[in-house]
Image: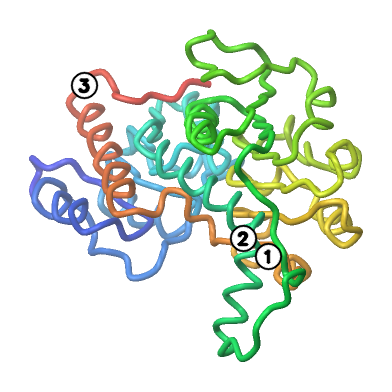
């Protein structure tokens, strides 16, 4: 064990270039075969006197967990943008830095949101099931029709980095873009989108609605029976943000009634065990929380987390610090 290398514990296996860097420049336990629990991360950190923890949602540090972080730890570097698995204020109050990985995953998350929009609107789930079953019959001209994406009005809730990237992509589909944020963006960041201060004023105009905001107690079940009812009949709903934002009973009811044409979901409330009713919906296209799951993005996320650990250990400014 080299005293010159920063001592870290990671909760999950990282892309190979990141693992190669860990092997060459850090003192770390062997690569975990499966994601480690919070208890396992803390046990290894205590044994190895780790200075840094690299975690994801697999190893949440909330509530009473914060007091159990070993005293050797100087930084919790989450390999994510989202922070809902961390009690940030409590961790900071212990004098432990917190960092995340913004920016590097913006494009891939926006790409995935567009994929969900298209997949839900064009009934990709139904079409792939037909092909998986061997096709076997031609479709009538009025059978299993989707809805056109081009030219539709897209509503975005949460116009941060990812929301803005989705707005830019939507312009390539000749979409009219509306957005709801707590405050209006500078015009150069709107990409031609129209701001609505009141979400309820925006929803009746949204033929497609996409969520791009954090999950927290204030935003929990933002999408519910009332807000879904404000969407026009036949709207498409997309969530590539956080499952807690959606009342899934209300979503299923809106799908079953035909009020919603379809939904594209990268997240759900009970991950990794979605409500079976969602899985059974014929026009719900789901992916397993993989917005950042590209070689380029996951590698960049891991490298940024390591850069932050090095900065902390070497008493340099953090690259992407999180504040309470």
Percent position (x, y) of residue 183? 65, 12
Is label 3 in contact with label 2 (beta carbons under 8 Å)? no
Q: Which of the two discs, 3 and 1, sits closer to the camera? A: 1
Q: How many marks?
A: 3
Front position in the image: 27 or 106: 106
Q: Which comes sooner in the sequence, label 3 or label 2?
A: 2
Asked if marks 3 and 1 touch (Cβ < 8 Å), the reply is no
Position of 194 with respect to 304 (left or right) is: right
Residue 310: give x, y in percent of width and height.
20, 33
Secondary structure beneath label 2: loop
Mark pair 1, 2: CA separation: 6 Å
Callout 2 crowding tier (Cα within 10 Å): few <14, some 14–19, many ≥20:
few
**Residue 282 at x, y percent in the picture:** 74, 70
**Residue named by callout 2:** 271
Task: Choose between 54 and 287: the one closer to the eye.
Answer: 287
Residue lying at the far top of the rendered structure = 186
Q: Residue at x 78, y 36 (%)?
A: 222
Image-quadrant location for residue 205: top right
The CA span between labels 3 and 1 is 43 Å
The residue pinned by badge 3 equals: 315
Q: Read off the residue under disc 1.
A: 274
Q: Measured from the top left, where is residue 31 in percent x and y?
A: 26, 64
Q: CA distance from mark 3 to mark 2?
A: 37 Å
Q: Are marks 1 and 2 in contact (CB under 8 Å)?
A: yes
Which is nearer the eye, 34 or 70?
Answer: 34
Badge 1 element? loop
């Amino acid at each position: 064990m080299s005293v010159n290398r920063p001592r870290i514990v990671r909760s999950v296996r990282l892309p190979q270039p990141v693992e190669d860097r860990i092997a060459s420049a850090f003192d770390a336990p062997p690569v975990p075969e499966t994601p480690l629990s919070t208890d396992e991360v803390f046990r290894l950190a205590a044994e190895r006197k780790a200075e840094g923890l690299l975690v994801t949602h697999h190893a949440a540090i909330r509530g009473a967990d914060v007091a159990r972080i070993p005293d050797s730890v100087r930084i919790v570097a989450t390999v994510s943008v989202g922070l809902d698995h961390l009690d940030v204020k409590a961790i900071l109050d212990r004098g432990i830095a917190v960092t995340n990985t913004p920016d590097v995953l913006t494009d891939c998350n926006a790409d995935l949101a567009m994929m969900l929009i298209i997949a839900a609107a064009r009934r990709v789930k139904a079409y792939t099931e037909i092909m998986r079953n061997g096709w076997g019959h031609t479709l009538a001209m009025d059978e299993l029709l989707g809805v056109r994406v081009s030219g539709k009005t897209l509503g975005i809730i949460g116009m941060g980095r990812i929301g803005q990237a989705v707005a830019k992509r939507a312009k390539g589909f000749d979409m009219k873009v509306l957005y709801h944020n707590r405050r209006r963006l500078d015009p150069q960041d709107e990409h031609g989108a129209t701001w609505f201060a009141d979400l309820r004023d925006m929803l009746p105009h949204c033929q497609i609605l996409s969520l791009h905001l954090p999950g927290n107690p204030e935003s929990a079940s933002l999408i519910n029976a009332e807000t879904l009812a404000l969407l026009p009949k036949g709207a498409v709903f997309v969530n590539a943000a956080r499952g807690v934002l959606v009342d899934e009973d209300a979503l299923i009811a809106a799908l079953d009634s035909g009020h919603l044409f379809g939904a594209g979901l990268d997240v759900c409330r009970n991950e990794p065990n979605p409500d079976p009713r969602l899985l059974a919906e014929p026009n719900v296209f789901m992916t397993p929380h993989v917005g950042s799951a590209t070689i380029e993005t996951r590698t960049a996320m891991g490298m940024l987390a390591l850069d932050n650990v090095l900065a902390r250990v070497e008493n340099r400014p953090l690259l992407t610090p999180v504040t309470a």
